[in-house]
Image (cartoon, rainbow, N blue to C red):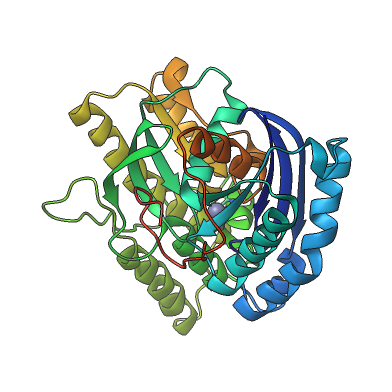
Amino acid sequence: MKLLAIETSCDETAAAVVEDGRNVLSSVIASQVEEHKLYGGVVPEIASRMHVQAIVPVVKNALKEANCSLKDINAIAVTHAPGLIGALLVGVNFAKGLSMSTGLPLIPVHHLRAHIAANYITHRQLEPPFLCLVVSGGHSHIIAVQSYTKFNIIGKTRDDAAGEVMDKAARALGLPYPGGANMDKISKGGNKNAYRLPRPKVSGSPYDFSFSGLKTSVINTIHNAKQKGEDIDIADMGASFINAVVECLTDNLQKAAKDLNIGKIALAGGVCANSVLRERCEKIFDKNLLYMPQIELCGDNAAMVGAQGFYEFISGNIADLSLNAKASLPVDKIN
Ligand code: KG4
Ligand code: ZN
């Protein structure tokens, strides 16, 4: 079964053709990074306009690269939530139009479910149940993936997401957008013990995260140093900050895995491209039971939407033309 998948939830316009949830026949991504870099972050209005411009050529390319025409496609999967509403609407309306004109079924896909499903592409043998740390620009969740379409949120951030604080700290250090990836690069070789930063905990909720205090602490340290005319070592501060975020993430994940007695662990979302997070997980979890998407599938792409879309389709999650985009939607809900 071949799915045409579409993703426009943030700043990548992406389309892919995926067979049976695991076999990626094509994956095309038009990134808007260069445009948003000028403003130091994603500008929602610009993102929507750029999706409108890119969606037709991106979908055409995905079909062409897969050696397919719409006649070979069995269903259309689209990210409908969560994300930037104006950005999501471009993909959702395009998919609805395509579904109406071709008669193909329309499958709504939750963005975080898609990030989790990126693992099914990289690891053909992976099947639920497992415990997944989903860390992106907008979310930081520990999720018990009970089946392909059943999710139980074990813990989540009470304030900022891990990716969001990576980006804000990187910006405070003067690094260009996208901050997380740049900080990862520049911090290699930095001393992770050079700066003392807090590891905030949420009292009474051992699996939840709180990153805003850590973000404030970095910003204040940089600000204070500037006022005193002192230099901040960017590599050392980056390494100290990444180490603090990774410790918070992995401490809670390790505790949840132990308490729930779940051996199979997966990572998902843009932040799981982080080299320190990946290395730390390889150290603390059984390597044979640890699953991480290949780096190209950590960030936003449509291949992962096609993977999850397949499992949504076989579980009967098919939308009609009343499908709407939603800026927020819990991962355990479908609309
Ligand atoms: O999943 P994603 O591509 O988009 C959302 O759904 O939000 O995640 C984007 C986030 C950004 O905050 C970005 O800075 C972060 O992932 N990120 C990284 C790395 N690569 C991307 N953070 C740390 N280290 C990286 N190597
Ligand atoms: Zn994402």
Q: Residue at x 63, y 62 (%)?
A: 178
Q: Is residue 308 above or below residue 1?
A: below
Residue 192 visible? The answer is no
Q: Is residue 37 above or below residue 115?
A: below
Q: Residue at x 40, y 51 (%)?
A: 334
Q: Camera-side residue: 56 or 135?
A: 56
Query: Which residue lies most toward the left here?
Result: 204
Q: Camera-side residue: 290 or 334?
A: 334
Name the spot of residue 254 as percent of width and height, x first: 29, 33
Query: Which residue lies most toward the bottom here?
Result: 227
Q: Is residue 210 above or below residue 76?
A: below
Q: Camera-side residue: 111 or 17?
A: 17
Locate the N terminus and report the quarter of the image it occupies: top right
* For residue 177, side relative to residue 73 (left or right): left
Name the spot of residue 120 as percent of width and height, x first: 55, 29
Name the spot of residue 163 as percent of width and height, x first: 48, 57
Name the spot of residue 273 as percent of width and height, x first: 57, 43
Q: Quadrant of residue 174?
A: bottom right
Q: Residue at x 53, y 51 (%)?
A: 108
